[in-house]
């Protein structure tokens, strides 16, 4: 008998079946739905040094998810200025180094035709404490990733909008002042999104 055979490892106690977490409707897309996908293909902003666009929207029964992308090209920035922009691009949140508030944040917004509106700045980390439902509408940014180098940055993300907008003009807005992007917007037809909802397919 070897030394460790004198110390047998006790079996693990039986575990109960874990309860599957289902996020509330306002916190994200339903996990068991195949969305109806609508092409958008519109620029929120386009200039010689920056492009931001909405590519498509996934419509779910409870809300919709916008596929957004952005690319920034180097202009006349010095190496030090470009390094500072690199920090701003990949951190994307206000902090002690760059200050706080909207001036240093990538912000998106949504304005319903009835006057209701939402901003990603209201929930900059995309999370809630879970104790109560926030007032509608809610807009959350989920960063999809990014890359960059000495002359260009590019990134992607999704915007979760809850609930589905009413019929009428839905305004989607963006602002990123640290990169020279002042408030800009496109207008989509809310009825087109609502009309696509019956095409959502349940998994089970």
Image (cartoon, rainbow, N blue to C red):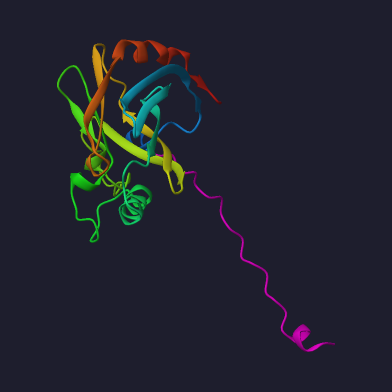
Which quadrant of the view contains residue 190?
Answer: top left
Locate residue 5 relative to residue 100 in the image: left or right. right
Is residue 16 among the parts visible in the rendering? yes
Q: Is residue 57 magenta?
A: no
Query: Does 4 sit left or right of 12 as displayed?
Result: right
- Residue that lies at the very extreme toward the right in this rendered image: 1
| Residue 34 against residue 101 in the figure, above or below | above
Magenta residues? Answer: 1-23
Residue under the image location 47 percent in, 18 percent down = 36
Q: Main secondary structure of the magenta part?
A: loop
- Say which of 35 and 90 sits in front: 90
Residue 149 appears at what percent x and percent y?
A: 46, 48
Looking at the image, which is closer to me, 171 or 89? 89
Q: Is residue 64 above or below residue 103?
A: above
- Asked if the stretch drawn in magenta spans residue 9, the answer is yes
Q: How many marks?
A: 0
Q: Which part of the image, by quadrant, shows the C terminus?
A: top right
Picture coordinates of residue 90, whole percent (x, y): 38, 50
Percent x, y for residue 53?
Answer: 37, 27
Drawn side of residue 190 relative to residue 117, left or right: right
Q: Quadrant of the N terminus?
A: bottom right
Say whether residue 59 is visible. no
Determine whether 106 is above or below 170 in the image: below
Most foreground residue, 182 or 164: 182
């Amino acid at each position: 008998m070897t030394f460790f055979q004198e110390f047998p490892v006790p079996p693990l106690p039986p575990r109960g079946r874990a309860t599957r977490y289902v996020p509330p409707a306002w916190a994200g897309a339903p996990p068991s739905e195949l969305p109806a996908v609508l092409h958008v293909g519109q620029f929120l902003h386009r200039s010689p040094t920056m492009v931001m666009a909405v590519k498509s929207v996934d419509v779910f029964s409870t809300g919709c998810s916008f596929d957004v992308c952005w690319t920034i090209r180097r202009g006349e920035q010095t190496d030090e200025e470009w390094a500072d922009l690199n920090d701003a691009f990949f951190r994307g949140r206000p902090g002690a180094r760059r200050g706080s508030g909207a001036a240093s944040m990538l912000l998106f917004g949504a304005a319903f035709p009835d006057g209701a509106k939402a901003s990603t700045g209201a929930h900059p980390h995309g999370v809630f404490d879970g104790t109560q439902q926030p007032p509608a509408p809610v807009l959350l940014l989920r960063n999809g990733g990014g890359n960059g180098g000495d002359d260009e940055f590019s990134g992607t993300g999704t915007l979760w909008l809850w609930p589905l907008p009413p019929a009428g003009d839905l305004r989607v807005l963006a602002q990123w002042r640290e990169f020279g992007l002042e408030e800009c917007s496109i207008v989509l037809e809310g009825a087109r999104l609502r009309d696509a909802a019956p095409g959502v397919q349940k998994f089970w």
